Amino acid sequence: MKRIAVMTSGGDAPGMNAAIRAVVRYGVSKGLEVYGIMRGYAGLLEDDMKVLNFSDVGGIMERGGTILRTARCQEFKVDKGRQEAYKILKDHEIKGLIVIGGDGSLNGAALVAAESDIKVIGLPGSIDNDISETDMCIGVDTCLNTVVENIQKLKDTASSHERAFIVETMGRNCGYIALISGLTTGAEAILIPEVKVDYQALGDKLLAGRKRGKINSIVVVAEGAASAYTVARHLENRTGYETRVTILGHIQRGGSPSVSDRLLASRMGSAAVQAFIDGQSNVMIGIQGNNIVSVDLNRALQKKKELDLSLYDLANTLS
Ligand code: ADP
Ligand code: F6P
Protein backbone atom coordinates (compact mmCIF):
# COMPACT_ATOMS: atom_id res chain seq x y z
CA MET A 1 0.00 0.00 0.00
CA LYS A 2 1.44 3.41 -0.99
CA ARG A 3 1.94 5.81 1.87
CA ILE A 4 1.54 9.60 1.82
CA ALA A 5 1.67 12.20 4.59
CA VAL A 6 -0.13 15.46 5.22
CA MET A 7 0.87 18.40 7.44
CA THR A 8 -0.28 21.92 8.25
CA SER A 9 2.43 24.55 8.70
CA GLY A 10 2.83 28.27 9.42
CA GLY A 11 -0.15 30.42 10.44
CA ASP A 12 -3.32 28.37 10.81
CA ALA A 13 -6.32 29.16 8.63
CA PRO A 14 -9.98 28.13 8.90
CA GLY A 15 -10.64 25.24 6.55
CA MET A 16 -7.35 23.43 7.17
CA ASN A 17 -9.30 20.67 8.94
CA ALA A 18 -11.64 20.30 5.99
CA ALA A 19 -8.56 19.93 3.76
CA ILE A 20 -7.03 17.29 6.07
CA ARG A 21 -10.33 15.39 6.06
CA ALA A 22 -10.45 15.46 2.27
CA VAL A 23 -6.83 14.30 1.92
CA VAL A 24 -7.37 11.41 4.34
CA ARG A 25 -10.75 10.26 3.05
CA TYR A 26 -9.94 10.66 -0.64
CA GLY A 27 -6.58 8.96 -0.09
CA VAL A 28 -8.12 6.04 1.82
CA SER A 29 -10.82 5.67 -0.85
CA LYS A 30 -8.02 5.30 -3.43
CA GLY A 31 -6.21 2.65 -1.42
CA LEU A 32 -3.49 4.88 0.09
CA GLU A 33 -2.27 4.92 3.66
CA VAL A 34 -2.26 8.49 4.98
CA TYR A 35 -0.04 9.72 7.79
CA GLY A 36 -0.79 12.94 9.65
CA ILE A 37 2.36 14.82 10.68
CA MET A 38 1.96 16.95 13.80
CA ARG A 39 3.10 20.62 14.02
CA GLY A 40 4.37 21.02 10.47
CA TYR A 41 8.10 20.70 9.82
CA ALA A 42 8.81 20.80 13.57
CA GLY A 43 6.77 17.62 14.13
CA LEU A 44 8.36 16.01 11.09
CA LEU A 45 11.82 16.55 12.58
CA GLU A 46 10.62 14.97 15.83
CA ASP A 47 9.13 12.03 13.91
CA ASP A 48 5.75 12.95 15.39
CA MET A 49 3.27 11.34 13.03
CA LYS A 50 0.50 8.76 12.98
CA VAL A 51 -1.74 6.93 10.55
CA LEU A 52 -5.08 8.64 10.02
CA ASN A 53 -8.04 6.46 9.13
CA PHE A 54 -11.41 7.45 7.67
CA SER A 55 -13.01 7.76 11.11
CA ASP A 56 -10.08 9.73 12.62
CA VAL A 57 -11.14 12.78 10.63
CA GLY A 58 -14.86 12.58 11.42
CA GLY A 59 -16.48 15.74 12.75
CA ILE A 60 -13.51 18.00 12.00
CA MET A 61 -14.73 19.82 8.89
CA GLU A 62 -16.58 22.44 10.91
CA ARG A 63 -13.76 23.04 13.38
CA GLY A 64 -11.45 26.04 13.14
CA GLY A 65 -7.68 25.68 13.57
CA THR A 66 -5.97 22.43 12.64
CA ILE A 67 -6.15 19.08 14.40
CA LEU A 68 -2.58 18.42 13.22
CA ARG A 69 -1.54 21.64 14.94
CA THR A 70 0.99 23.93 13.33
CA ALA A 71 4.33 25.52 14.03
CA ARG A 72 7.12 27.60 12.64
CA CYS A 73 10.42 25.73 12.48
CA GLN A 74 13.77 27.43 11.93
CA GLU A 75 15.63 24.12 11.76
CA PHE A 76 13.92 23.22 8.51
CA LYS A 77 15.40 26.29 6.87
CA VAL A 78 18.89 24.81 7.19
CA ASP A 79 20.22 22.05 5.01
CA LYS A 80 21.11 19.73 7.90
CA GLY A 81 17.58 19.93 9.32
CA ARG A 82 16.00 19.13 5.97
CA GLN A 83 18.34 16.16 5.37
CA GLU A 84 17.18 14.74 8.71
CA ALA A 85 13.57 15.25 7.67
CA TYR A 86 14.10 13.38 4.37
CA LYS A 87 15.62 10.45 6.27
CA ILE A 88 12.58 10.29 8.58
CA LEU A 89 10.19 10.35 5.62
CA LYS A 90 12.25 7.67 3.85
CA ASP A 91 12.35 5.44 6.95
CA HIS A 92 8.54 5.54 7.00
CA GLU A 93 8.45 4.81 3.26
CA ILE A 94 6.43 7.95 2.68
CA LYS A 95 6.27 8.59 -1.05
CA GLY A 96 4.21 11.74 -1.12
CA LEU A 97 3.96 14.84 1.10
CA ILE A 98 1.03 17.24 1.09
CA VAL A 99 1.82 20.55 2.75
CA ILE A 100 -1.05 22.88 3.67
CA GLY A 101 0.22 26.35 4.53
CA GLY A 102 1.21 29.84 3.49
CA ASP A 103 4.04 30.96 1.22
CA GLY A 104 6.74 30.16 3.78
CA SER A 105 5.50 26.61 4.21
CA LEU A 106 5.21 26.18 0.46
CA ASN A 107 8.79 27.42 0.01
CA GLY A 108 9.83 24.64 2.38
CA ALA A 109 7.75 22.18 0.34
CA ALA A 110 9.46 23.27 -2.90
CA LEU A 111 12.82 22.45 -1.31
CA VAL A 112 11.60 18.96 -0.38
CA ALA A 113 10.64 18.43 -4.02
CA ALA A 114 14.02 19.72 -5.25
CA GLU A 115 16.21 17.88 -2.75
CA SER A 116 14.52 14.49 -2.34
CA ASP A 117 12.60 11.95 -4.38
CA ILE A 118 9.43 12.50 -2.36
CA LYS A 119 6.52 13.75 -4.43
CA VAL A 120 5.33 17.08 -3.08
CA ILE A 121 1.95 18.76 -3.45
CA GLY A 122 1.25 22.17 -1.86
CA LEU A 123 -2.14 23.50 -0.80
CA PRO A 124 -2.42 27.28 -0.25
CA GLY A 125 -3.78 27.75 3.28
CA SER A 126 -3.44 31.30 4.59
CA ILE A 127 -5.78 34.13 5.50
CA ASP A 128 -3.43 36.58 3.73
CA ASN A 129 -4.37 35.54 0.16
CA ASP A 130 -0.87 36.44 -0.96
CA ILE A 131 -0.10 33.37 -3.07
CA SER A 132 0.02 33.58 -6.88
CA GLU A 133 -1.60 31.20 -9.35
CA THR A 134 -4.67 30.78 -7.17
CA ASP A 135 -7.57 33.19 -6.82
CA MET A 136 -8.15 32.16 -3.22
CA CYS A 137 -6.34 30.44 -0.38
CA ILE A 138 -8.08 28.23 2.15
CA GLY A 139 -9.21 30.41 5.08
CA VAL A 140 -9.57 33.75 3.33
CA ASP A 141 -13.36 33.71 3.02
CA THR A 142 -13.91 32.84 6.69
CA CYS A 143 -11.42 35.49 7.74
CA LEU A 144 -13.21 38.11 5.65
CA ASN A 145 -16.56 37.18 7.19
CA THR A 146 -15.07 37.59 10.66
CA VAL A 147 -13.54 40.96 9.79
CA VAL A 148 -16.75 42.24 8.19
CA GLU A 149 -18.86 41.12 11.16
CA ASN A 150 -16.55 42.97 13.53
CA ILE A 151 -16.32 46.16 11.48
CA GLN A 152 -20.11 46.18 11.35
CA LYS A 153 -20.18 46.13 15.16
CA LEU A 154 -17.63 48.93 15.33
CA LYS A 155 -19.79 50.99 12.99
CA ASP A 156 -22.65 50.82 15.51
CA THR A 157 -20.60 52.30 18.29
CA ALA A 158 -18.78 54.70 15.95
CA SER A 159 -22.14 56.15 14.82
CA SER A 160 -23.50 56.40 18.35
CA HIS A 161 -20.48 58.39 19.54
CA GLU A 162 -19.77 60.12 16.22
CA ARG A 163 -16.23 58.81 16.37
CA ALA A 164 -13.60 57.76 13.88
CA PHE A 165 -12.41 54.15 14.12
CA ILE A 166 -9.14 52.90 12.73
CA VAL A 167 -9.41 49.14 12.27
CA GLU A 168 -6.19 47.21 11.70
CA THR A 169 -6.37 43.93 9.81
CA MET A 170 -3.77 41.21 9.27
CA GLY A 171 -2.33 40.21 5.90
CA ARG A 172 1.41 40.62 6.35
CA ASN A 173 2.61 42.54 3.26
CA CYS A 174 -0.60 42.02 1.35
CA GLY A 175 -3.62 44.35 1.47
CA TYR A 176 -6.24 41.83 0.36
CA ILE A 177 -8.04 41.42 3.70
CA ALA A 178 -8.21 45.19 4.26
CA LEU A 179 -9.28 45.90 0.70
CA ILE A 180 -12.13 43.40 0.51
CA SER A 181 -13.40 43.98 4.05
CA GLY A 182 -13.20 47.76 3.57
CA LEU A 183 -15.06 47.61 0.27
CA THR A 184 -17.80 45.36 1.62
CA THR A 185 -18.41 47.40 4.78
CA GLY A 186 -18.39 50.75 2.99
CA ALA A 187 -15.36 51.95 4.96
CA GLU A 188 -14.52 55.56 4.21
CA ALA A 189 -10.89 54.78 3.54
CA ILE A 190 -8.70 51.73 3.07
CA LEU A 191 -4.94 51.80 3.60
CA ILE A 192 -2.98 48.99 1.96
CA PRO A 193 0.75 48.39 1.41
CA GLU A 194 0.22 48.40 -2.36
CA VAL A 195 -0.78 52.10 -2.34
CA LYS A 196 1.29 54.86 -0.71
CA VAL A 197 -0.49 56.38 2.29
CA ASP A 198 -1.44 60.05 1.84
CA TYR A 199 -2.50 61.36 5.27
CA GLN A 200 -3.51 64.75 3.92
CA ALA A 201 -5.94 63.25 1.39
CA LEU A 202 -7.22 60.84 4.03
CA GLY A 203 -8.01 63.69 6.45
CA ASP A 204 -9.69 65.67 3.68
CA LYS A 205 -11.85 62.69 2.77
CA LEU A 206 -13.04 62.22 6.33
CA LEU A 207 -13.77 65.94 6.73
CA ALA A 208 -15.77 65.91 3.48
CA GLY A 209 -17.73 62.89 4.70
CA ARG A 210 -18.77 64.67 7.89
CA LYS A 211 -19.78 67.73 5.86
CA ARG A 212 -22.09 65.45 3.87
CA GLY A 213 -23.72 64.37 7.11
CA LYS A 214 -21.82 61.17 7.95
CA ILE A 215 -21.82 60.46 11.66
CA ASN A 216 -19.02 57.91 11.72
CA SER A 217 -15.71 57.34 10.00
CA ILE A 218 -14.23 53.89 9.49
CA VAL A 219 -10.69 53.53 8.18
CA VAL A 220 -9.45 50.01 7.52
CA VAL A 221 -5.68 49.72 7.60
CA ALA A 222 -3.71 46.64 6.59
CA GLU A 223 -0.96 45.79 9.07
CA GLY A 224 1.57 46.03 6.24
CA ALA A 225 0.54 49.59 5.33
CA ALA A 226 0.94 51.48 8.61
CA SER A 227 0.35 51.15 12.32
CA ALA A 228 -3.26 51.92 13.22
CA TYR A 229 -1.97 54.15 16.05
CA THR A 230 0.08 56.25 13.64
CA VAL A 231 -2.95 56.65 11.39
CA ALA A 232 -5.10 57.66 14.37
CA ARG A 233 -2.58 60.29 15.48
CA HIS A 234 -2.43 61.84 12.01
CA LEU A 235 -6.21 61.88 11.71
CA GLU A 236 -6.84 63.36 15.13
CA ASN A 237 -4.38 66.14 14.39
CA ARG A 238 -5.92 66.88 11.03
CA THR A 239 -9.64 66.50 11.76
CA GLY A 240 -9.99 66.88 15.52
CA TYR A 241 -12.34 63.85 15.59
CA GLU A 242 -12.37 61.63 18.60
CA THR A 243 -10.61 58.52 17.36
CA ARG A 244 -10.36 54.93 18.56
CA VAL A 245 -8.14 52.10 17.39
CA THR A 246 -9.17 48.45 17.09
CA ILE A 247 -6.58 45.85 16.18
CA LEU A 248 -8.52 42.77 15.16
CA GLY A 249 -5.50 40.49 15.61
CA HIS A 250 -5.71 36.72 15.77
CA ILE A 251 -9.51 36.47 15.91
CA GLN A 252 -9.11 36.78 12.13
CA ARG A 253 -7.57 33.32 12.01
CA GLY A 254 -10.16 31.52 14.13
CA GLY A 255 -13.68 30.26 13.82
CA SER A 256 -15.65 27.59 12.04
CA PRO A 257 -14.90 27.73 8.30
CA SER A 258 -17.48 29.22 5.96
CA VAL A 259 -19.31 27.10 3.39
CA SER A 260 -17.01 28.51 0.75
CA ASP A 261 -13.85 27.50 2.65
CA ARG A 262 -15.21 24.02 3.42
CA LEU A 263 -15.95 23.51 -0.27
CA LEU A 264 -12.60 24.92 -1.43
CA ALA A 265 -10.67 22.82 1.09
CA SER A 266 -12.58 19.65 0.17
CA ARG A 267 -11.95 20.21 -3.53
CA MET A 268 -8.29 21.13 -3.07
CA GLY A 269 -7.55 18.31 -0.60
CA SER A 270 -8.93 15.63 -2.89
CA ALA A 271 -7.22 17.20 -5.94
CA ALA A 272 -3.89 17.09 -4.10
CA VAL A 273 -4.19 13.34 -3.57
CA GLN A 274 -5.29 12.84 -7.17
CA ALA A 275 -2.25 14.83 -8.33
CA PHE A 276 -0.03 12.44 -6.35
CA ILE A 277 -1.80 9.41 -7.86
CA ASP A 278 -1.27 10.92 -11.31
CA GLY A 279 2.47 11.08 -10.63
CA GLN A 280 2.71 14.84 -10.26
CA SER A 281 5.21 16.54 -7.96
CA ASN A 282 6.40 20.06 -7.12
CA VAL A 283 2.93 21.40 -7.87
CA MET A 284 0.42 23.49 -5.98
CA ILE A 285 -3.32 23.02 -6.17
CA GLY A 286 -5.10 26.30 -6.84
CA ILE A 287 -8.45 27.65 -7.94
CA GLN A 288 -8.72 29.80 -11.06
CA GLY A 289 -12.19 30.95 -11.96
CA ASN A 290 -14.16 28.07 -10.53
CA ASN A 291 -11.69 25.47 -11.76
CA ILE A 292 -9.37 23.51 -9.52
CA VAL A 293 -5.96 23.52 -11.17
CA SER A 294 -2.53 22.04 -10.58
CA VAL A 295 0.20 24.63 -11.15
CA ASP A 296 3.98 24.62 -10.98
CA LEU A 297 4.89 25.25 -7.34
CA ASN A 298 8.02 27.30 -8.07
CA ARG A 299 6.14 29.48 -10.50
CA ALA A 300 3.44 30.15 -7.89
CA LEU A 301 6.10 31.08 -5.33
CA GLN A 302 8.24 33.23 -7.59
CA LYS A 303 5.44 35.28 -9.08
CA LYS A 304 4.21 38.18 -6.97
CA LYS A 305 0.48 38.06 -6.33
CA GLU A 306 -1.04 41.18 -7.82
CA LEU A 307 -3.85 42.85 -5.93
CA ASP A 308 -6.73 43.95 -8.16
CA LEU A 309 -6.41 47.71 -7.69
CA SER A 310 -9.59 48.36 -9.67
CA LEU A 311 -11.34 47.18 -6.49
CA TYR A 312 -9.45 49.84 -4.54
CA ASP A 313 -10.69 52.50 -6.98
CA LEU A 314 -14.21 51.08 -6.74
CA ALA A 315 -14.14 51.22 -2.94
CA ASN A 316 -13.03 54.87 -3.11
CA THR A 317 -15.75 55.75 -5.59
CA LEU A 318 -18.49 54.07 -3.60
CA SER A 319 -17.56 55.37 -0.16
P1 ADP B 1 3.44 30.63 6.38
O1 ADP B 1 3.56 29.26 5.81
O2 ADP B 1 2.12 30.87 7.05
O3 ADP B 1 3.81 31.69 5.38
P2 ADP B 1 6.05 30.96 7.66
O4 ADP B 1 6.57 31.92 6.66
O5 ADP B 1 6.35 31.25 9.10
O6 ADP B 1 4.48 30.75 7.59
O7 ADP B 1 6.66 29.52 7.29
C1 ADP B 1 6.29 28.38 8.03
C2 ADP B 1 7.46 27.44 8.14
O8 ADP B 1 7.83 26.99 6.83
C3 ADP B 1 8.74 28.02 8.68
O9 ADP B 1 8.78 28.10 10.08
C4 ADP B 1 9.77 27.02 8.19
O10 ADP B 1 9.74 25.84 8.95
C5 ADP B 1 9.22 26.71 6.79
N1 ADP B 1 9.88 27.60 5.81
C6 ADP B 1 9.58 28.88 5.52
N2 ADP B 1 10.42 29.39 4.59
C7 ADP B 1 11.31 28.40 4.32
C8 ADP B 1 12.44 28.30 3.47
N3 ADP B 1 12.85 29.31 2.70
N4 ADP B 1 13.12 27.13 3.47
C9 ADP B 1 12.72 26.08 4.22
N5 ADP B 1 11.67 26.12 5.04
C10 ADP B 1 10.96 27.26 5.10
O1 F6P C 1 0.26 34.65 7.68
C1 F6P C 1 -0.85 34.70 8.52
C2 F6P C 1 -0.68 35.75 9.59
O2 F6P C 1 -1.84 35.74 10.40
C3 F6P C 1 -0.38 37.16 9.08
O3 F6P C 1 -1.55 37.82 8.60
C4 F6P C 1 0.22 37.80 10.31
O4 F6P C 1 1.08 38.86 9.96
C5 F6P C 1 0.99 36.66 10.93
O5 F6P C 1 0.43 35.45 10.42
C6 F6P C 1 0.95 36.64 12.43
O6 F6P C 1 1.79 35.63 12.86
P1 F6P C 1 1.83 35.07 14.37
O7 F6P C 1 0.74 34.05 14.47
O8 F6P C 1 3.17 34.46 14.47
O9 F6P C 1 1.59 36.21 15.28
Image (spheres, rainbow, N blue to C red):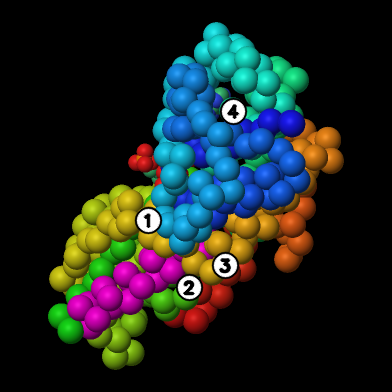
Disc on the earlier residue, 4 or 3: 4
Task: Please provide percent x and percent y for residue 207.
Answer: 29, 77
Disc on the earlier residue, 4 or 2: 4
Report if residue 153 lies within the magenta region. yes
Per the model, the C-alpha gap separating discs 4 and 3 is 27 Å
Which label belongs to residue 254?
Answer: 1
Q: How many marks?
A: 4
Residue type beneath disc 4: Gly
Which of the pair 48/188 is nearer the observer?
A: 48
Which of the pair 37/217 is nearer the observer?
A: 37
Q: Secondary structure at mark 2?
A: helix
Residues rendered magenta in the picture: 139-159
Residues marked 1 and 4 touching at CB (< 8 Å): no
Which label belongs to residue 108?
Answer: 4
Report the mark closest to the observer, 3 or 2.
3
Instruction: Bin the neighbour count of mark 3 within 10 Å (Cα to Cα): few under 14, some 14-19, many 20 and up.
Output: some
Report if residue 233 lies within the magenta region. no
Q: Which residue is mark 2?
A: 183
- Determine whether the beta carbon of the residue marked 4 sits less than 8 angstroms from the nearest atom of ligand 1: yes
Q: Which residue is mark 3?
A: 260
The residue at the point 28 percent across, 76 percent down is 153
Task: Please provide percent x and percent y for residue 298.
Answer: 72, 34
Residue type beneath disc 2: Leu
Task: Please provide percent x and percent y for residue 147.
Answer: 38, 65
